[in-house]
Amino acid sequence: MSAVVVVGAQWGDEGKGKVVDLYAPYAELVVRYAGGANAGHTLVVGGEKLILHLIPSGILHEQTNCVVGQGTVIDPAVFLKETEALNVRGLDTRGRLVVSQRAHVVLPHHKLIDELREKRSGGAIGTTKRGIGPCYEDKVARRGVRMGDLLNPERLQSKLAANLECWRPVAEDLGGTLPTAEEITAQYTDLGEALRAYIGDAAAIVRASIQANEKILLEGAQGTMLDIDNGTYPFVTSSNAVAGGACAGAGIGPTHIKSAIGIAKAYTTRVGGGPFPTELEDETGQQLRDAGAEYGSTTGRPRRCGWLDLVALRHAVAVNGLNELAITKLDVLNVLGELKVCVAYELDGERLEYPPYERIEDVTPIYETLDGWDEELAKYRSRADLPAAAQRYLDRIEEEVGCRVGVVSVGPDREDTADLVDPFG
Ligand code: IMP
């Protein structure tokens, strides 16, 4: 058992990027298993800011190989741009990065339809408009185009022709015009050629890595509450973001997974529409947004902010089978005097320990108030040294959700981390 899954335990943006970056040096292979360019992770490379949407941040560690698995959906132009940005900064990606030939391709009309639907619905879901939903729709409807198809123009054009026929009435109804199969073929064949060195048999690489007993880090995107099956449906993304998604999305069996580590912020954020029981639409929410720089790295949208929702986290512990939690941005809470955590919901007079399958927008959070701490935390390297109130905050998380807290992030930099240990150890 040599694989560790890192999964978002809330509504995405939990700081998975930082944790994967901390764990990657311990891994021989990092595999991204779900989602697409809706995700975003800001890195600092050679003193310069760089946002990666598709390529795992493990690419920064030269001894680590990276795979983008079959469970992802790939916008080839975004992928190419990211490889170029890394190469320009002196990071050689060739030979260390493979994108699965089975991963589905985000096509121009996927982005168009995503955008037109958002417009028509008045932004009800608030998608990232990266074409994620329509691309996964094509995948399950068994009419999708896969990365391997980009290397075979004839096959690509015939698949595109059939695919476009299915979308035509939808596009017309939404007032959009579809490109032709020939136009997309020309553009995407060029992209395929530019990416030829990267498109490969990712599943075989994962298999060989398992057989060689290498350490594999499985990197999730988005978060548990955005998972298509386990999240706040229909206000979710279109993939299995949970740890279980790592098996299908990377091509790995559950028996190879050693542990699942859930990443959770010390408070809660959400971008886009949908229920958010602990949301703070007041000054406290704004304080969290300012202190935590809570603006989307993909869309730049201000994130909705609120108290830590332990009901959602308890659910994440259950559905991901978490062995451990990594708590990020604990330092952001420095700005607040008194802290609240939601320990249960109330719905129609009933106390709920787990999220209901619908009507989450109708629940009333039941809060517990905890003392804050008025102290910078970035200097601490061990939980045992943190101010007593911060330790108590972490203790209450563990007690309420039944999962131990391992790593604690106390600042944005790599070094601002307490209790970092080898996740494979
Ligand atoms: P989509 O994934 O673009 O279809 O968007 C569906 C929902 O998931 C929207 O509410 C998005 O804001 C949200 N979402 C998608 N990707 C992310 C992410 O990486 N972080 C946070 N929210 C996300």
Image (cartoon, rainbow, N blue to C red):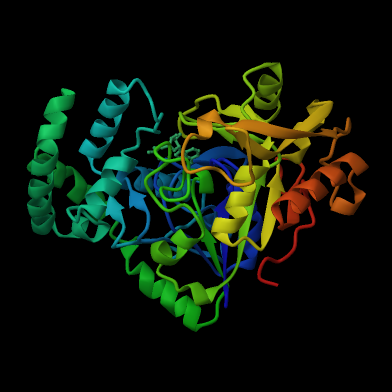
What residue is drawn where x is 47% and y is 34%? 298
- Residue 335, percent from left and from top: 79, 26
Residue 315 horizontal/vertical position (percent): 59, 50
User: Eyeballing the image, is 198 above or below 290?
Assistant: below
State which quadrant residue 338 falls in. Answer: top right
Seen from this angle, which residue lies furthest top?
283
In this picture, residue 116 sits left or right of residue 410: left
Image quadrant of ligand 1 equals top left
**Residue sitting at x 58%, y 52%:** 316
Q: Is residue 422 above or below residue 386?
A: below
Viewport quadrant of the C terminus: bottom right
State the residue at coordinates (77%, 52%): 399
Q: Position of residue 173 (x, y in %)?
A: 14, 26
In the displayed structure, does residue 346 sit left or right of residue 154? right
Q: Position of residue 288 (x, y in %)?
A: 69, 26
283, above or below 411, in the image: above
Image quadrant of residue 184? top left
Q: Nearer the viewer, residue 417 or 404?
A: 404
Decide if residue 387 is in sight here. Answer: no
> Is 235 left or right of 156, judged from the image as shown?
right
Residue shown at the point (34%, 20%) measured from the top left: 122
Q: Is residue 210 above or below residue 38?
A: below
